[in-house]
Image (cartoon, helix red, strand yellow):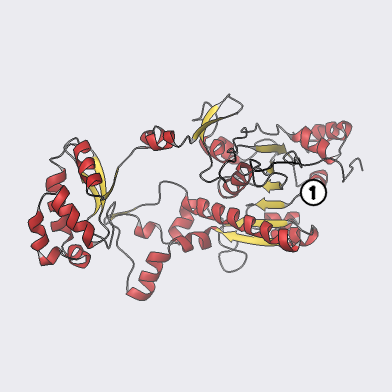
Amino acid sequence: MECDRDAGTAAGSHGTAGDTRDQRPLEGVRVVALEQAVAAPLATRHLADQGATVTKVERVGGGDFARHYDTEVLGLASHFVWLNRGKESVALDVKTRAGGEVLGALLERADVFVHNLGPGSAANLGVDAGTAAATYPGLVAVEISGYGRSGPYKDRRAYDFLVQGEAGVVSVTGTPDSPAKSGIPIADIAAGMYAYSATLAALFRRERTGVGASVHVSMLEALAEWMGHPLYMATYGGGAPPRTGTAHPAIVPYDAYPTADGDLVLIGVQNDREWERLARQVLERPELLDDRELATNIGRARNRERVDYLVTKVTSGLPTGELLTRLDEASIAAGRLNSVAGLAEHPQLRELGKWQDAGSPVGPLRMLSPPAMPDGVPPGHGAIPRLGEHTDTVLARLGYTSHQVARWRADGVVA
């Protein structure tokens, strides 16, 4: 055995004395990730943004298959760029005896272990969340699956759009004639964010009690939570809300309305006081307030087509800028139907200083900063790693000799 199990410290562990108010919250926390695609990488990227040292264990040869979804970011895959900044990449065949030993050495030193391997894969390796938490005292072991650890769906492969279907999201999204999945992978995102928040909660508990945790998050359960409104409507109200495109199924007017410039402006009227301001100041139709059928939201919902016609008749004759000015002056919630390209140049993101450069194998990339950091703490913007970029560094930190690593490289155990 050429490994000193007490050798090395986490790359993110500083332990400096003095003023630490600008120190990122998770500096010194060591995370090991057996991850791929979206859900787990999203959770661990947020941990990295908060200062944790995240060691991403990837397959020898191809690595995380999200590296190969596309080449849109100057030759890199857009999903991978989004989800993997600030991580160490170790290319390791964990199915080999030596690879399993290295994974065990990583877990011995880890505070957190996150994986989203396929059904049964982690258990076959002996690192499912329950086993890992029991084997390594104090470890917070987090497992992300498609459908959960038991039940008739536990062995099913789960991809985002399949879970969107099973969770009923597709049934309430789209137009009356055409159901649609969300344009972003919300099942993955939901699971990843619950894994992230559960990890933080478990670390906080461990800080007080010294006790680790086994945590399981399934994509179905995470997305079912997000479906609470239509779920309880269907359970107790006799039916789920219908698909209404950009409109709201229960609030009127609440939709995208055309302007004279050919744009669409989103207008949301939440209560009867706002309806009064909309009629007087935006539509300039105060006589509508005498119409009892439109006096309440319930009445307006019953007369949806008529209300939308009245609103559209005015908005379609106004330039976009003038309409937005009227809405702002009347304190009516409104927004543009923006494009993704428009989001990239959004003046509010620019004013908030949300864009920062991050390193990558193809040079600096403009990336969004984390959406939430403590005041005064600089955002985490680590580099996006090449496959296996940190293999030698991490193995040396674990105490393995260069001779041992060279043998493993020749045998295909590491890359």
Q: Residue 356 location, x and y as percent?
A: 53, 31
Q: Residue 24 location, x and y as percent?
A: 64, 43
Residue at image point 63% right, 61% down: 216
Residue 126, quarter of picture: bottom right
Q: Is residue 391 above or below residue 306?
A: above
Residue 262, quarter of picture: top left
Assess disc 1: are there few (<14), some (14-19) or many (≥20) residues with their C-alpha within 10 Å of its C-alpha.
Answer: many
Q: Residue 291 location, x and y as percent?
A: 9, 63
Q: Compare residues 35 and 12 and report the one nearer the observer.
A: 12
Q: Compare residues 341 and 184 and report the one nearer the observer.
A: 341
Question: Looking at the image, which residue sits at the far top?
Answer: 363
Question: Looking at the image, which residue sits at the far front?
Answer: 18
Residue at image point 39% right, 37% down: 348
The image quadrant where one finds the C terminus is top right
Q: Is 42 on the left-hand or right-hand side of 262?
A: right
Q: Amino acid at mark 1?
A: Arg
Using the rendered image of the protein, determine whether residue 70 is visible from the camera's viewpoint.
Answer: no
- Say which element carries label 1: helix
Q: Is 70 on the left-hand or right-hand side of 97?
A: left
Q: Is 80 on the left-hand or right-hand side of 304?
A: right
Residue at image point 87% right, 45% down: 6
Q: Residue 83 location, x and y as percent?
A: 56, 41
Using the rendered image of the protein, determine whether residue 38 is visible from the camera's viewpoint.
Answer: yes
Residue 254, quarter of picture: bottom left
Q: Compare residues 255 and 279 and report the one nearer the observer.
A: 279
The image quadrant where one finds the N terminus is top right
Q: Is 241 on the left-hand or right-hand side of 82?
A: left
Residue at image point 80% right, 41% down: 9
For disc 1, the marked residue is 109
Question: Could you tell me how many numbered marks the image carries?
Answer: 1
